[in-house]
Image (cartoon, grey):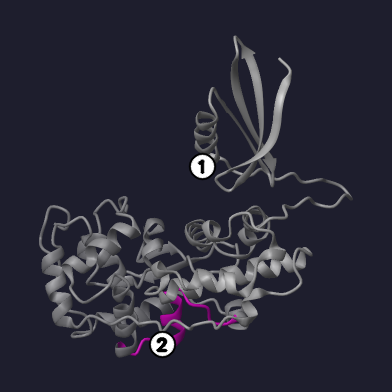
């Protein structure tokens, strides 16, 4: 049937083209279409309200698709804020940061930044509008989140400037508040003793013992495996995309907790551990186990080079390149942690697993 009406209508954050078609017997259908910024969204309904509802439902699940050109032709990129930001994430940021950082950055972007700026033109973004984001009630008590959002928004604007979408960074006038980080607090031997008793037989016992006696980061536990006298795991804090493993000697205090099979089973997720650990050890957070291991290394006189290797820290570009520590050296330094009084001397219970 011929088209009887075509105009632009606002539906959510989209300026949608509307077509009204006659279907016969004086009845009509409304067709809504949006094709812009990588989105292709189409919906229809017998009434305008029904067509809007169908469109919004599809829009919630829609993901922009970006068109690129090969050869000598220029790459296409979106021109509005959210679409360009998605393009920046997929084309550039994914190559610059670790997968874990990329995932967290993308979550923050979708939760806080994208809803605020939507599909604004970069030329319309002012310092005042950016300040409104940081002044929101939901962010006032989240200093670290505000700091992370500031950094993320800054790199998006720098990318937009590099693509010629804006000339100045609107964040230049905004005061960047520095979040005061609260450093970890090591557990005392008395607290370690109480923790061991409380964790006995629980789901989080093994991962907590691994963190306490190896200094592992929570997200490194899933890669942990036993290799002779060592626990080997992937180092998650390397900014290069090269895979790097670290090896920590198995301490005497850890051995009773390891399975006889020599295979570490699947462990609870970092989020699960973070949530449940404070219930067992009040006034402490999960990362305090890593702080405790590092502190014990210092107290036992473990050489700084070995301690940094255990913790997964860089020795510096030159030293990383020309340092290859032997297993004998690592075992000798770790043996200092087996000394009486360094770690709580309480051993694991005699269970079927440790007999």
User: Which residue is found at the position 49% from the left and 34% from the top?
Assistant: 53
Q: CA distance from mark 2 to mark 1?
A: 55 Å
126 versus 184 height, above or below: above
Looking at the rendered image, the quarter that the N terminus falls into is: top right
- What residue does disc 2 label? 303
In which quadrant of the rendered view does residue 125 lie? bottom right
Q: Which mark is residue 157?
A: none
What stretch of residues is rendered in magenta? 300-316
> Residue 289, can we see it?
yes
Q: Determine the residue positioned at 29% across, 74% down.
A: 289
Q: Residue 242 versus residue 37: which sits nearer the camera?
A: 37
Q: Residue furthest front?
A: 26
Q: Is residue 315 magenta?
A: yes
Using the rendered image of the protein, determine whether residue 239 is visible from the camera's viewpoint. Answer: no
Q: Nearer the viewer, residue 68 or 325?
A: 68
Provide residue 139's location: percent of width, then percent of height. 42, 70
Q: Quadrant of the C terminus?
A: bottom left
Q: Which of disc 1 and disc 2 is earlier in sequence? A: 1
Q: Identify the secondary structure beneath mark 1.
A: helix
Q: Position of residue 45 (x, y in %)?
A: 54, 25
- Asked if residue 28 is positioned above or below residue 115 in the image, the reply reads above
Residue 60 badge: 1
Q: Nearer the viewer, mark 2 or mark 1?
A: 1
């Amino acid at each position: 049937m011929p088209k009887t009406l075509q105009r632009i209508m606002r539906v959510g954050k989209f300026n949608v083209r509307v077509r009204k078609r006659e279907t016969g017997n004086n009845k009509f259908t409304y067709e809504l279409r949006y094709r812009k910024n990588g989105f292709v969204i189409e919906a229809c309904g017998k009434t305008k309200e029904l067509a809007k509802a169908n469109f919004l439902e599809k829009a919630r699940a829609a993901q922009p698709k970006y068109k690129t050109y090969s050869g000598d032709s220029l790459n296409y990129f979106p021109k509005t804020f959210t679409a360009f930001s998605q393009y920046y994430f997929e084309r550039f940021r994914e190559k610059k940061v670790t997968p874990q950082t990329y995932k967290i950055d993308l979550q923050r972007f979708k939760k806080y930044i994208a809803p605020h700026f939507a599909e604004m033109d970069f030329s319309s973004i002012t310092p005042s509008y950016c300040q409104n984001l940081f002044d929101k009630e939901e962010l006032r008590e989240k200093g670290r989140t505000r700091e992370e959002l500031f950094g993320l928004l800054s790199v998006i604007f720098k990318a937009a400037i590099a693509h010629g979408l804006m000339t100045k960074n609107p964040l230049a006038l905004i005061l960047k508040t520095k979040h005061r980080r609260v450093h970890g607090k090591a557990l005392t031997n008395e607290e370690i003793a109480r923790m061991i008793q409380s964790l006995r037989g629980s789901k989080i016992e093994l991962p907590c013992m691994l963190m306490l006696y190896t200094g592992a980061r929570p997200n490194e536990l899933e890669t942990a495996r036993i290799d002779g006298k060592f626990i080997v795991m992937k180092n998650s804090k390397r900014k290069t995309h090269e895979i790097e493993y670290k090896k920590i000697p198995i301490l005497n205090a850890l051995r009773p907790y390891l399975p006889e099979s020599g295979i570490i089973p699947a462990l609870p997720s970092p989020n699960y551990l973070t949530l449940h650990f404070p219930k067992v050890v009040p006034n402490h957070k999960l990362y305090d186990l890593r702080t405790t291991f590092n502190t014990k290394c210092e107290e036992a006189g473990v050489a700084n080079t070995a301690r940094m290797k255990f913790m997964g820290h860089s020795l510096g570009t030159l030293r990383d390149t020309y340092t290859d520590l032997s297993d004998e050296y690592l075992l000798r330094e770790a043996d200092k942690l087996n000394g009486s009084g360094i770690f709580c001397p309480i051993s694991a219970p005699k269970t079927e697993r440790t007999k």
